[in-house]
Image (cartoon, rainbow, N blue to C red):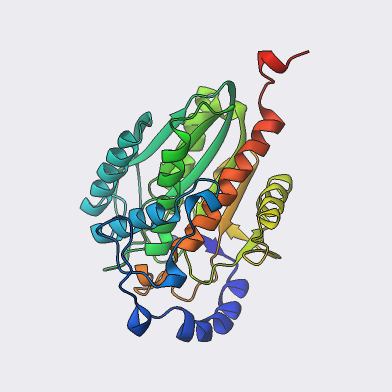
Amino acid sequence: MRKQIFYLWIPALFVAPLCLTACGGKGPLATEETSAVAAAPVLTPQQTAPAPDKTGGFDGQRAFQHVSDLVAIGPRTAGTDGNHRTQDYLIGQLKGFGCPVDPEAFHTPTPIGDMDMRNILVKIPGTSPGIVLFLTHYDTKRLPNFVGADDGGSSTGVMLELARLLCPRKNALTVWIAFLDGEEAFNLEWKDPDNTYGSRELAARMALSGDLSRTKAVILVDMIGSRDLRIKRDTNSTSWLTDLVWSTASRLGYGNIFVSSETSVEDDHVPFLRRSVPAVDIIDLEIPYWHTLQDTLDKLSPNSLAVVGHVLMAVLPQLEQKFARPSAATRP
Ligand SMILES: [Zn+2]
């Protein structure tokens, strides 16, 4: 994604010094504490997610384990073996949760040649036809040895955990979760149309099928794993939906993370905004390691994943209240 350059680098100058104390590796603070999942790294107390019953059932530790598994695959750039192994991982996990999984392949020109890509869709039937569409991208920036723990990893871990919670439920609204391919530009520079391949494809397909006309809200999550998470309101996003997410976060006590200052982001929500579908981007782009080899697992906190997951779990019932048809039992 791209942000206005002025906003991007000036704050980064102020954020970077914080990293000296807050973003280091495990070091002497590491404890003997083991996580619930055998392969998880040893975590410091600060990195441990709260118990799921404190975050709406969302398990930040499980989400973090997914990110760890994704990082272990290595670079996951569209069209590469790592990308294809990531697709296998996503499909395997989602099927394990009992989710209906629908891989949607497409073919697209890119600056490095024509390419096959795949969006992985989960479509959970609800009691009402209206759709809430959650988005993440699972591809990583085309840079040598770039593993995208935060950029591509963190939001994908959150969406996998969200799928585990929502797939077995009969939700009042139809819930779709899309794991998008090809968000990143192949060239270093973000220049249209070399970006957001997956979301442009999905929006176009949903417009053709008629599904877009029953889509009530698109909620994009991207880069939300930082230990120093601070999410500004994106001015490109739809106001009422942004208000709903930010007021929910404030009510849950996360006003220090979902802050009121504003920024402007181009990301996978734009193809939906262009088609007049309400959409919001939940993203912290002011991270000192963005698109560098320092975007590694040690920069992330399971607690940050849990905070965002908690907010998503709390936003959904409000959208259902707003858009779901009343059930027969409650109809006058
Ligand atoms: Zn990126």
Image coords of residue 184 (percent x, y): 41, 56
Task: Please tell me which residue is depicted at 29% across the width and 50% down the height of the picture.
Answer: 113
Quadrant placement of the C terminus: top right
Outermost right residue: 332
Q: Is residue 60 left or right of residue 284?
A: left
Kindly give the residue lying farthest to the left in the view shown: 81
Q: Residue at x 42, y 58 (%)?
A: 154
In which quarter of the view is residue 7 placed? bottom right
Q: Is residue 225 left or right of residue 187?
A: right
Q: Is residue 79 above or below residue 300?
A: above
User: Residue 4: x and y, percent?
Assistant: 60, 67
Residue 24 location, x and y as percent? 40, 81
- Residue 275 can be seen in this image: no
Eyeballing the image, is 298 above or below 55?
Answer: below
Q: Nearer the viewer, residue 136 or 161?
A: 161
Residue 68, x across and y down, in percent: 32, 60
Residue at x 32% of width, y 43% of height: 90
The part of the image, by quadrant, that contains residue 33 is: bottom left
Query: Total marks drawn?
Result: 0
Q: Residue at position x 42%, y 61% from top?
A: 151
Compared with 261, 251 (above or below) is above
Residue 27 visible at all: yes
